[in-house]
Image (cartoon, rainbow, N blue to C red):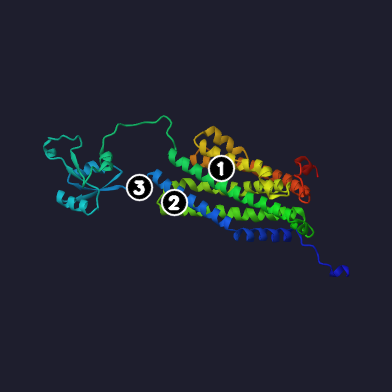
Amino acid sequence: MSGANRPTAPSFVDSVSLIAGREITMRLRSKAFLISTGVLMLAVLASVVLGSLFGGQSEPTKVAVVGTAADAVADSDALEAVPVDDEAAGEQLLRDGEVDAIVVPEPGAHQGQTVDPLGITVIGLDQTPTGVVQALSVHPSVELLDPAAVDPGLAYLVAFGFGIVFFMSALTFGTTIAQSVVEEKQTRVVEILLSTVSARALLTGKVIGNSVLAFGQILAIAVLAILGLMLTGQKVLLGGLGGSVTWFVVFFAIGFVMLAALFAATAAMVSRSEDIGSVTTPVTMLVMIPYFLVVFFFDDPTVLGIMSYVPFSAPVGMPVRIFLGHAEWWEPIVSLVILVATTALAVAIGERIYRNSLLKTGARVPLAEALRG
């Protein structure tokens, strides 16, 4: 056969494209991937609903008001006055369920003979309208030395949301990459692949393919969260979350590339599926620790500050600080630069381990040997 008729090896870009496309196709056909995505979507919806409840952004309670009683109701933002001509008209609205209570002037109020300091009487249907009574109650003025910028319950839900999305997405796709590497090595498919493409192209294709899926999943979750906030009327929370969600997507996209390379590299050191857990445990811990830290220390500025600059926890710590208003404008940029540099270093080291371990079967390849080659 003449040299002109020999098939040429695919270029690096073509090889990476083929491998990435293969990874994406396989994952989209996987029930585990679809189930995990569905679970994440449900978790996001639950967080949005709970945020609506904790956010206290409910509509004002409607009450029927008679005459001068409207003055007492006008001072409360939690109540919406529905003027009526007399008590009988208010009673009809109350029985029809259009209002929650009737507020009428106390008998004798116009003559100064009142028992209630507000000079009004609240009428309920079959039980005391506690919400209306509390809204009309007289409270002393309260001042806080260090007022919280965000409700603690809401802050916890946001921190938990970022933490669980990062944890489940990174762990799901990272484990998938590790299993794929070992399966190809165990079945010796990798030997066939390496006869056509380089180890670097194979690793790059796997990382890019799974990163695209993970990034797409995060984008879908972000869009779902924004739509949920809009539909539940949480416009204030939506405004506060917009910037932090954007930064979370950016940080996750870069951080996952780092984790994916490490998952693939460590998995290449073994030849059996049973050994995956032992070699990927250190990388798994890098995914789990940020989740537990942000859940238990979501209100600790010191812990969140440290997390914001540690590359493995920055995708969670920095967006939470941005939401809470604790981060200066330049801090996300500095943290992102650190993350990019660390990712480049991790990919270089991971590629070396992957390349030196991929064709070695049998016992686990020691880390020193994998690095040395």
The amino acid at mark 1 is Val
> Residue 192: image x %, image y %?
77, 59
From the viewer's perspective, tell me whether residue 337 is left or right of residue 366.
left
The earlier-in-sequence mark between 1 and 3 is 3
The amino acid at mark 3 is Ser
Q: Quadrant of residue 10?
A: bottom right
Say whether residue 330 is visible: no
- Any mark on residue 229, and which? 2
Q: Quadrant of residue 280?
A: top right
> Residue 92: image x %, image y %?
18, 53
Q: Check disc 2: other Cα within 10 Å, few if <14, some if 14-19, many if 20+.
A: many
Q: What residue does disc 3 label?
A: 58
> Residue 7: image x %, image y %?
81, 67
Residue at screen point 59% across, 39% down? 289
Q: Check disc 3: other Cα within 10 Å, few if <14, some if 14-19, many if 20+.
A: few
Residue occupying the far right of the picture: 2
Front residue of 365 and 265: 365
